[in-house]
Structures are given as C-alpha cells and as structure tokens.
Image (cartoon, grey):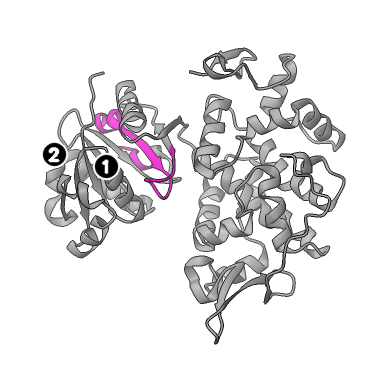
Amino acid sequence: MSRQIESVAVIGCGTMGSGIAAASAAAGCKVLMLDVSTEAVERALGAVAEEHQHLVTTGTIADDLDKIADYDWICEAIIEDLDVKRELFPKLDELRREGSVISSNTSGIPLRDITEGMSEQLRRDVAITHFFNPVQVMKLFELVPGEDTDDEVVEAFASFGANQLDKGVVRAKDTVNFIGNRIGCFFMLSGLHLAKPFLMNGMKQETVDAVLGKPVGLPPTGLYGLIDLIGLDVMELVGKNLAVNLPDGDLGHAYTEFPEVEQAMHDRGQLGRKARALGGFGRVQKLEDGSKKKETFDLIDQEWRDTVAPDLTGVSADLGAVIFEDSMAGELAWQVFGGTLRYAADLIPEIADDVLNIDNAIRWGFNWAKGPFEMLDHLGPAKVIERIEAEGGEVPAMLQVLRDAGAETFYRGEGDSLEFLGLDGEYHVAG
C-alpha cells in the first residue's frame, strides 16, 4: 500500500477533534492539534493522556495552519457548517504535502457538498472519517469515500482505523447521515411521533423506554433517555438536515419535525442532560436535605412528576419476543423498533452495499445487541414478512431479496465460515 498514516493533524479540537487526537496519540502517532485560540487547544489537550502528550504539538488555525505540511492525515473536525468547511478545505489543500490524505469528521454532511468544485487532487485524496463520541470508547468508524476518492486512500484510512486505532471500520455511502445516524436517528425521530398515541392511552414514558430497551436488545436509555443524552437541540438539527437531504419518498420525511410538545421543550431550552436544572424528558432534583429525586416531564400533562417504575407486565424476557405480543407493549415495539428494522431493510444499496456493514455500524455505534438484519434473523424473516403483508404493507427491498432467493436468513454459518446474503440473492463470505 502506497499511503501510510503515521502522523495526524486535527483541525478543530472540540469534543470530537480532541478525541481523535487523543486516540491517535495513544496509537503512537505524532499529532498536531489546532483550534481557534490557544486557550481552546490547551483545554482540548486535556483529553490526551499525560503519557502521550509528548507526541502532541499545539497551535492556532490562524498562526500555525502551515504546519499541516508535516503530517500524513489532515482531519477536519470543525463545526457542522457546510460554508465554514468549504472555506477551510482549499486552505488545507494548498498547505498539505503531496501524498497526504485528508478527511472531514462530519456526522451527516455529504462529502460531495463539501468538495464540490475543488481540485481534482483534493477529491482523489479525501474521504469522510466519522467517529462516534466518545472516540476512545466507541468502536464505530464510518469510512465514506467520494466518487473520486482513490482506492489506496480508502485502504489507508481503513488500515489505520482498524490496526492503529483498533476501531470497527464500516464502509458507508456518501448519503445523508451515512449508516449509523441514518438508522439510529430514524428510530429516535419516528419514536417521538409513534409513541405519542400509546402515551395518550395511558402508557408511561418510563414504560416506553423500558420496552424499547432490553426487551428488543437496545441500551437501557430506550427512546427518551437516549434523546436526553444527545440533546433536543442536536436532534432538531439532524431533523432539518434530513428534511433537506433525504431522497424523495423516504419514510424519514414524515418525522423530520418534532411533535408540538417536544418542539416547545426545545424552544424553552429543555434540551436534555446538558440543560441541567431545566432537564429534558427527565431530570434529577436535589432536595433540601441533600438527597436527590428523579422526575419525568409528562408529555401528556406537560408538567413535571415523580419518576415511576416501568410496567413490563407480560413482556417476555426473551430477546425480541415482545415485538409479536398482542399487547400495547407489543404494538409499541412493532411500530417503533420493528419500523426501524423495516426502514433499515430498505436502505441497501443506498447507504451501504451489504447487510454486514449496516449491522456492524448499528452494533458498534448505538450498542444494539444485534444489528437490524441479525435481529430480523432472530425474529424470523418469514414471520416479519407475513405480518407486513397482513397489515397491507410493502415488503422492504432486502426482505424481498431474501424471499426471492428462497433463503430463510440473512446470515448462515459462523466464525470464519460466516456468510451473508447479498443484494444479488447469493451468499458471500464475511471476511
């Protein structure tokens, strides 16, 4: 391989940039950290373990950008603003050395929009390298080449991500929100809408979170807890980005705007954990005696109340079994979680070439116990298809491929013999 990454220049050292710098230094790389001010970059340096700080050089974008000429990989990690990124990239291209590779850590802006009209050499040497936060903990590394990206550049990033950073590399397409956030954000945004009728029928938010947690193989944050962790402000921006960039006819268009109550929460600063006392869907109140109590913002009454235990009466402990239960919990699981599985099954080859990349992205990026296609295998694809058709729905593309191929599952075998079903209806070695 003709491209090697042994040194990294990170431009923009917020949460993500500082995490990438810290992970690169921990891998033994020489690292340059640049931000808008000395104070900002010095704060970011705190993310780098003390034993690795000798590998790091710091500076400001205004005074030290020319230093990127000494580094193999120039990683842009500035704010999620297309115009600002487009202003920066020609400067990076002019100053970097021949043979270097360059990337953006954007979480959802298409690469083609960032590099449109820029030099042919830049477009050959650029990709998106999207890490998940916190970088040093989360395994997922989405690698997104552009139409003109050289194969050797893609392989250099993939090798560095897997071998030096010990990440799980998935190959994504240059589409809005790539793989992880395209599916994960559909779950969250659709969930806000689809859960509302269940709340109006008496189900508590705590129960919604509990049903959309361990019973379906998702983290215990469920729906509302996950959005509290991310922040309604971030989710609103995600929704606006999706509204502009989703393909016509995509199911996600129905959910790009918040329901009325959630929009009002956002507008008054009730964003989630980051809002502290204002909270989000939940908050922790400190009492006069020094103790604490958990409160939930009731979306129906629109006022705070004491958090209650979820009601999982009758919900099976068997993974995924709830999705077929004849109960409110079962219907909730089918509509929200099952709807996300059906959405994912319709996104090949748009966002990725195969089921393996999608499953890895969701397990590594959102900590699902099983990726969407692994879960469909667990539930029984034929059973899922039967219910979709019984409800008058359209069978998603990959489930149709499976049926047309006469296959029973998306995966067969295990270990080194593991194979996955491709869009062509044939099984391929997963290696």
343 to 309, vertically: above or below: above
Q: Nearer the viewer, mark 1 or mark 2?
A: 1
Residue type at mark 2 is Ala
Q: Nearer the viewer, residue 282 or 406?
A: 282
Disc on res. 97: none
Disc on res. 69: 2
Q: Which residue is mark 1?
A: 26
Q: Position of residue 356 (x, y in %)?
A: 55, 26
Q: Quadrant of residue 394?
A: top right
Residue type at mark 1 is Ala
Q: Secondary structure at mark 1?
A: helix
Give, as a single range, the part of the protein colored magenta.
Answer: 113-140
Neighbour tally class for label 2: few under 14, some 14-19, many 20 plus, Cα within 10 Å: some
Q: Position of residue 102 (x, y in %)?
A: 27, 36
Query: Which residue, as the protein is rendered here, is positioned at the far bottom?
Result: 288
Count numbered badges in the picture: 2
Quarter of the picture holding the N terminus: top left
Relative to 3, 184 lies left or right: right
Relative to 364, 409 lies left or right: right
Residue 400 part of the magenta segment: no
Q: Position of residue 124 (x, y in %)?
A: 29, 28
Relative to 374, 163 lies left or right: left
Q: Residue at x 36, y 44 (%)?
A: 105
Quote the CA–CA distance across marks 1 and 2: 22 Å
Q: Residue at x 78, y 55 (%)?
A: 312
Q: Position of residue 90 (x, y in %)?
A: 23, 43
